Amino acid sequence: MTAMVQSDGEIDWGAKRYLIVDDFVGIRQLLRESLRNLGAKHIDQAASGGEGMMLLAKTRYDVVLCDYNLGDGKNGQQVLEEARIRNLILPSSVWLMVSAEKSVESVMGAAEHQPDAYIIKPITEGVLLTRLNRVWIKKQIFSEIDQAYADKDYLRAARLCEEQIPVNPLHAIDLLRMKATLQLKAGDPLGARKVYEQVLEERDYNWARCGLAKIMMHDGEVEEAQKMFQAVIADNRFYIDAFDQLAQAFQLQGKHEEAFDVLQKAAKLSPNSVPRQRTLGQTALRLENIPVAERAFRKCIDIGEYSVAKTVDAYFGMARVCGKKNDTKEAIRLLNAAVHQFGGDQVTLRAKITEGLVYHETGDFRRARKSGDELEAMLADESRHRPDTATCLDMATLLFAVGVKEAPVVLLCYIARNNHDNVPLMDELQKIFDKARMGDEGTELIRSSRKEAADMMNKGVLLWKSERLQEAIDWMRVARHALPHNMRILFNSAQILISRLQQTGYVRELADEAIEVLMHVDAIAPGQPRFAQLMEQLALLAPVSGVVAAAAASEYEAANGAVPDR
């Protein structure tokens, strides 16, 4: 997407592609005529959020004018949110949010997803042209970055940002902000941290302070990050992302009451965020504040109906609330709705766990035990994939509670082997064993499980360092099969495959295997630093630098139904 400028220095608005999304035909016609008066020729229109999403999926637009209120279905905030998450708009695209709404709630909700401007109706042609000119000129510094971004080569896009800074010194801050964002997307938090620190040497931008604090929190500097988030909020009480991150910092420190207070303030400021309402509901439930948990989960279900962020967690959380209120019938209805709407083995498994917990909480121990027996049968089915760590923890807790011993022990040992270097998680496992009156036995099981995983990994690394690369590759395949979610084993396996390619030259089968391992890592835990580094090493080894690796990664995502993140 290249900025086109007429000979007199004015922007050539006729060469661009436009999308108007508004549920009122009169407004669409008005905006279309205003654009035509600017010279626009390529104008598409959508009467709903759903129709807008279909057009965005087919065409790369230069300019999007989207109303906030779109009647039934997705609203403008949800359209922008999904477009961002699905990478349907490029860094240089212009998104103007149009609305008659002036409420703080609406403006804050839209602003969270960062439109380039928020225009209040009625809109004159002069206002529209002024906003377009102002935003377009600023955005075109990213035009050369678009292709790398579209290819998901975020490290190259970040380097292009750096190259643009001496060319566009007036927009250096915007380029640095984009560079840091791209480095985080590529799994390079160290590089992003340097950018944020560089910016903060010049001026205390809240976005840079917030970005730096997020990285500090990820690196274990939680208390320092907490203080920085608090400073941002003190400086700007509407900086909503700082509230969310501060709550997370408190959660990491075990300060759940403090996190709850922050989340309540954030939800009051901007209530239309699905993730925020989900987190508030889960925190309230943990603190046994059932009224707040109920309001949050109900709101989460309501606003999530047409959102890309719609989550089954809200249904499970609301079912737990119903269990606390002894409304078993409503809880079971919600669980059935979750299974029907979301489907899949994992959702069915989680629904069965929640069902058992609800029965146990309401004192129906016979049905709780029946749920436990059914879960035990599910676990014995080898065709099923192991659930995620959080689900395994819930399942083990329930199974112990209903008197099952062997199956939860197997689950907790599985978690220990796949996360052998995660000390906080090991403490959580120990607490579950302690509650089941298996404290000493649990300690030994955790120790032996961690040792087993470390021994498997160390054997592969030793073979690699002894330059017995083929043996190392074969052994790491065995280790991956045994421990498919162990991040250390997965990364080392990919590194050994790359070492083999560096020794023998490019072999497509080995490169595909390495990419498959890395994409599996990215699906489990996006944004890991080693992911970007290893993917770049693979790209450099490809016959045409980056092309083969990018194509293989896209094939993997298509085959596994992966949705690009943003």
Image (tube, helix red, strand yellow):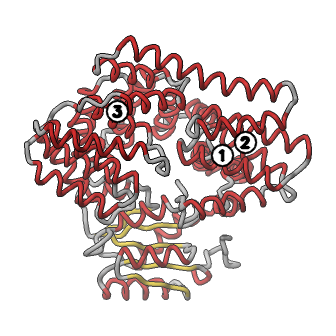
Element carrying mark 3: helix
Q: Is residue 304 above or below residue 453?
A: below
Identify which amino acid the numbered label 3 is placed on: Ala
Mark whose residue sits in front, 3 or 2: 3
- Residue name at image x 74 percent, y 34 percent: 475
Residue 84 in percent (x, y) is at 48, 60
Q: Is residue 285 left or right of residue 166?
A: left
Along the polypeptide, which appears first: circle 1 or circle 3? Answer: 3
CB-based contact (under 8 Å), mark 1 and mark 2: yes
Alpha carbon of mark 1 to alpha carbon of mark 3: how far?
29 Å
Reading the image, the residue beneath label 3 is 396
Residue 323 seen in render: yes
Along the polypeptide, which appears first: circle 3 or circle 2? Answer: 3
Residue 104 seen in render: no
Reading the image, the residue beneath label 1 is 518
Alpha carbon of mark 3 to alpha carbon of mark 2: how far?
35 Å
Mark whose residue sits in front, 1 or 3: 3
Reading the image, the residue beneath label 2 is 534
- Residue name at image x 35 percent, y 70 percent: 98
22 vs 397, nearest the viewer = 397
In the displayed orientation, state which residue is furthest to the right.
504
Q: Is residue 12 above or below residue 139?
A: below
Q: Is residue 237 above or below residue 275?
A: above
Residue 200 in percent (x, y) is at 55, 32
Identify which amino acid the numbered label 1 is placed on: Leu
- Residue name at image x 38 percent, y 23 percent: 428
CB-based contact (under 8 Å), mark 3 and mark 2: no
- Residue name at image x 17 percent, y 57 percent: 333
Residue 370 in percent (x, y) is at 22, 43
Q: Residues within 10 Å of mark 1 (few under 14, many from 20)?
A: many
135 vs 564, nearest the viewer = 564
